[in-house]
């Protein structure tokens, strides 16, 4: 019964979610509750729920008192909560005289949403300030009590006495506004500030402690001090355009800003400029959130008292600010505020803002109008609700710039001084380069800020002061490089060379120079045979190039070729020694004695030779399933590969390896029999060939248009039809007469048809049976089309019969 009572008390009274069906708790039940009967886990659970709702220990204490819980049980509850491990107490009172308040400065206050961990930036200035979970507006009791704070019923005072006498009193201001000290009587402190209350309390203590009036040097001196250790809760009504209006129980140290944060702040329709605090039926203060956010002003942010009313009215006027400002967004203006005030709110303009003329868009009746506000009138222009202020960008244009580029040492932009001439600009740019084309340069000049014209000049005459040109704003000078006015000269080399390449042409380059630059000869190169292909320009339509044969040595010694120089666009080809060939490797894997990679000894080496090199087969070799995989190296091979890929895409049942490889069906069993070696079935190997000899196969697979594609055990007594039957038979889309088999070695055998008879291929272990799919007939007539044609023919027949009769 005790557990049920405390659960109902904390869940319904503390969290204010009492339902109509909840059981009413009588005063006698609450007075019998014993906190000692509850476990730490139960206390932790209830305290976590209280924190999730934003309640403090003080608020729980007040609500518990109103339900009749005794002071002793309330004190035990507070002590149990304070003793919880790793707690965040959110308390404003002390559990004993020596302890201090355990407020976490990072604790959330007011509206809590644990799922929100980041603040979404809102265009309305000040709106996201109240949505930031990282900001805490919990009143900090660790700070000195404000001098303006007035004591009232519910506040708890700590009175320390030390010196010739020692004592301490922890007293709460009762409903009559007094604290009661033994042998002193009631001391009425309600409505007094802390300083006045301290003076009054110490004066009353003199009745029982004469040493308080003694001088400081007296051995009988008694000292006394009064501090606030428990803050009462005040009821505040927050109404109007706030996210969660209602009545809030807040600490008496809370201000208007604390209350607004607890209520979630103003909505987007609420004002941020004129928050009214109503006390005693009259407006006590007005709080401007903008003044707080921008200037840090606390004007109007008054300490709250019991039964205060905070009113958030609808906004006055909002202005949308866009463009080159430091803080674009929506701002609320008070009556009489101008653009100068708005500039202060959005923190001024960016560096590239055009401030001389601002653009204001305004709704005027049924349509919009645009106003331009010049700099001198910005202080007098009155903005209205719904206006849009746009700040433009300065134009990308220079009033005193000229530029120079090309074959110049310091290209770039330069200042246009009065009377600046072309020769002076060239001197500023450190002069022309050695490769400059001296016969002609160009000045690009802008005319009427729109069109451009070209002014040619002689670079040679300008630098020798024989001619000059007066420059204008935005002139762009370009001096050409003589190498840019002709085709780029190159020479190239290929063949038996380590680094075939094309490089820039250099005068007086020998063949040996180009070979050395290209990394020297490759192994197998024949230095005595070097071909040079040279461009010719003889005006003939038949001559394509001139071929020159030269020779050199492996040591690249300049001898016979000393007087022969390469010319632009020469192509040098170094040949290989006749018959030179790199090693060509093939491999054999699977059930052979020595699998691995082997080099071909001669060009006519065959499959049987490779098997001999591997010392024959293992006992588990399945020769009928042996496959030769060949890489597609030549262009012809690649064309065949592309054709096969095109075929396989048309039939989804076919499987084809696309990594430039193709399987070749071979009959290794016949090759290794007498007379098979060196025969036409014993293929000549090529570089990259891989022979794979599998283990004995024991299955047969069925794919394609059957009801249940399957992998079955091989049985030599089974026929083609038996395996089809085991797979559920043919489907409706199957083309039975075109069914075929792909054997383990890559061979393909199709079904043969003669009149009404079908001859199916023989089944071997590892075979793959494929049943193709019917192709879609795109030209097949629909039922409607057939009916139309039939009706037309019938009508035509009737017409012919009528004409005959």
Image (cartoon, helix red, strand yellow):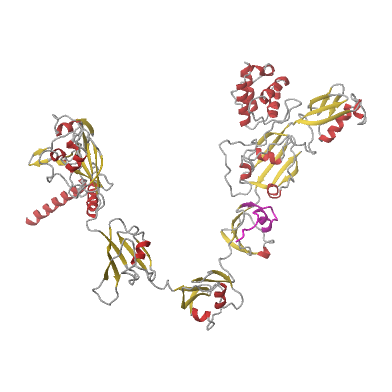
Q: Is residue 101 above or below residue 774?
A: above
Q: Quadrant of residue 33?
A: top right
Residue 300 point in image, percent of width and height:
74, 44
Q: Quadrant of residue 473?
A: bottom right
Which image quarter holds the C terminus? bottom left
Q: Nearer the viewer, residue 759 or 589?
A: 589
- For image coordinates 69% across by 17% down, the residue present is 31
Residue 766 point in image, percent of width and height:
20, 35
Residue 682 point in image, percent of width and height:
15, 44
| Numbered-mark total | 0
Residue 771 in view, yes or no = no
Magenta span has 341?
yes
Among all residues in the image, which is located at the extreme bottom? 466
- For image coordinates 69% across by 33% down, the residue present is 103
Magenta span has 18?
no
Residue 572 in view, yes or no = yes
Q: Nearer the viewer, residue 487 or 102?
A: 487
Q: Is residue 262 above or below residue 85?
A: below
Q: Nearer the viewer, residue 500 or 280?
A: 500
Q: Quadrant of residue 188?
A: top right
Q: Nearer the viewer, residue 344 or 738?
A: 738
Residue 410 point in image, percent of width and height:
54, 69
Tell me where the magenta segment starts and ends, as one range. 330-352
Which image quarter holds the N terminus? top right
Q: Is residue 23 above or below residue 285?
A: above
């Amino acid at each position: 019964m005790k557990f049920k009572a405390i659960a109902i008390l904390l869940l319904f009274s503390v969290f204010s979610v009492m339902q109509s069906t909840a059981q009413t708790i009588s005063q006698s039940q609450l007075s019998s509750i014993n906190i000692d009967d509850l476990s730490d886990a139960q206390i932790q659970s209830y305290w976590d729920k209280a924190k999730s709702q934003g309640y403090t220990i003080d608020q729980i204490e007040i609500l518990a008192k109103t339900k009749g819980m005794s002071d002793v049980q309330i004190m035990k509850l507070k002590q149990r909560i304070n003793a919880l491990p790793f707690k965040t107490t959110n308390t404003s009172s002390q559990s004993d005289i020596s302890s201090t308040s355990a407020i976490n400065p990072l604790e959330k206050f007011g509206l809590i949403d644990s799922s929100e961990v980041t603040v979404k930036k809102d265009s309305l200035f000040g709106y996201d300030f109240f949505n930031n979970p990282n900001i805490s507006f919990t009143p900090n009791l660790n700070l000195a009590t404000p001098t303006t704070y007035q004591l009232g019923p519910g506040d708890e005072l700590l009175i320390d006495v030390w010196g010739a006498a020692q004592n301490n009193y922890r007293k709460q201001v009762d409903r009559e506004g007094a604290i009661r000290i033994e042998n002193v009587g009631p001391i009425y402190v309600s409505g007094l500030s802390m300083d006045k209350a301290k003076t009054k309390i110490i004066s009353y203590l003199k009745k029982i402690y004469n040493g308080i009036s003694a001088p400081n040097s007296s051995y009988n001196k008694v000292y006394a001090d009064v501090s606030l250790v428990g803050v009462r809760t005040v009821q505040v009504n927050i109404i109007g355009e706030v996210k969660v209006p209602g009545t809030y129980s807040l600490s008496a140290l809370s201000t208007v800003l604390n209350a607004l944060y607890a209520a979630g702040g103003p909505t987007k329709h609420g004002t941020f400029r004129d928050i009214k605090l109503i006390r005693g039926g009259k407006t006590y203060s007005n709080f401007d959130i903008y003044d707080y956010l921008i200037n840090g002003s606390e004007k109007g942010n008054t300490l709250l008292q019991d039964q205060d009313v905070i009113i958030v009215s609808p906004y006055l006027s909002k202005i949308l600010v866009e463009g080159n400002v430091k803080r674009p967004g929506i701002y609320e203006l008070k009556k009489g505020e101008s653009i100068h005030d708005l500039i202060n709110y959005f923190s001024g303009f960016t560096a590239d803002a055009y401030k001389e003329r601002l653009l204001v868009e305004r709704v005027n009746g049924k349509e919009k109008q645009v106003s331009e506000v010049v700099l001198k009138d910005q202080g007098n222009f009155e903005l209205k609700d719904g206006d849009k202020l746009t700040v433009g960008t300065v134009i990308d244009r220079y009033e005193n710039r000229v530029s120079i580029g090309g074959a110049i040492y310091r290209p770039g932009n330069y200042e246009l001084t009065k009377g600046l001439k072309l020769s002076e600009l060239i001197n500023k740019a450190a002069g022309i380069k050695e490769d400059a084309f001296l016969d002609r340069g160009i000045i690009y000049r802008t005319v009427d800020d729109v069109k451009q014209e070209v002014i040619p000049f002689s670079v040679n005459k300008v630098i020798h002061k024989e001619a000059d040109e007066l420059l204008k704003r935005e002139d762009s000078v370009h001096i050409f490089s003589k190498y840019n006015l002709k085709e780029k000269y190159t020479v190239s080399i290929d063949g038996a060379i380590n680094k075939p390449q094309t490089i820039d042409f250099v005068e007086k380059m020998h063949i040996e120079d180009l070979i050395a630059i290209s990394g020297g000869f490759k192994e197998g190169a024949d230095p005595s045979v070097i071909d040079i292909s040279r461009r010719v320009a003889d005006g003939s339509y038949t001559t394509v190039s001139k071929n020159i044969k030269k020779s050199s040595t492996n040591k690249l010694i300049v001898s016979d070729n000393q007087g022969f120089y390469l010319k632009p666009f020469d192509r040098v080809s170094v040949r290989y020694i006749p018959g030179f060939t790199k090693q060509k490797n093939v491999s054999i894997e699977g059930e052979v004695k020595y699998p691995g990679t082997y080099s071909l000894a001669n060009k006519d080496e065959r499959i049987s030779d490779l098997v001999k090199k591997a010392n024959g087969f293992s006992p588990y070799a399945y020769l009928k399933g042996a496959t030769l995989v060949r890489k597609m190296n030549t262009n012809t091979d690649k064309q065949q590969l592309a054709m096969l890929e095109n075929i396989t895409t048309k039939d989804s049942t076919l499987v084809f390896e696309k990594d430039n490889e193709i399987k070749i069906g071979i009959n290794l069993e016949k090759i290794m029999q007498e007379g098979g070696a060196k025969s036409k079935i014993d293929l000549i190997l090529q570089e990259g060939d891989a022979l794979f000899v599998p283990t004995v196969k024991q299955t047969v697979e069925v794919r394609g248009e059957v009801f249940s594609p399957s992998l079955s055990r091989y049985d030599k007594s089974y026929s083609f039809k038996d395996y089809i039957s085991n797979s559920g038979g043919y489907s409706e889309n199957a083309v039975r007469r075109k069914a075929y088999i792909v054997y383990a070695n890559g061979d393909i055998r199709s079904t043969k048809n003669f009149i009404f008879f079908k001859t199916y291929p023989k089944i071997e272990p590892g075979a793959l049976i494929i049943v193709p799919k019917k192709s879609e007939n795109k030209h097949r007539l629909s039922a409607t089309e057939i009916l139309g044609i039939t009706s037309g023919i019938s009508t035509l027949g009737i017409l012919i019969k009528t004409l005959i009769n």
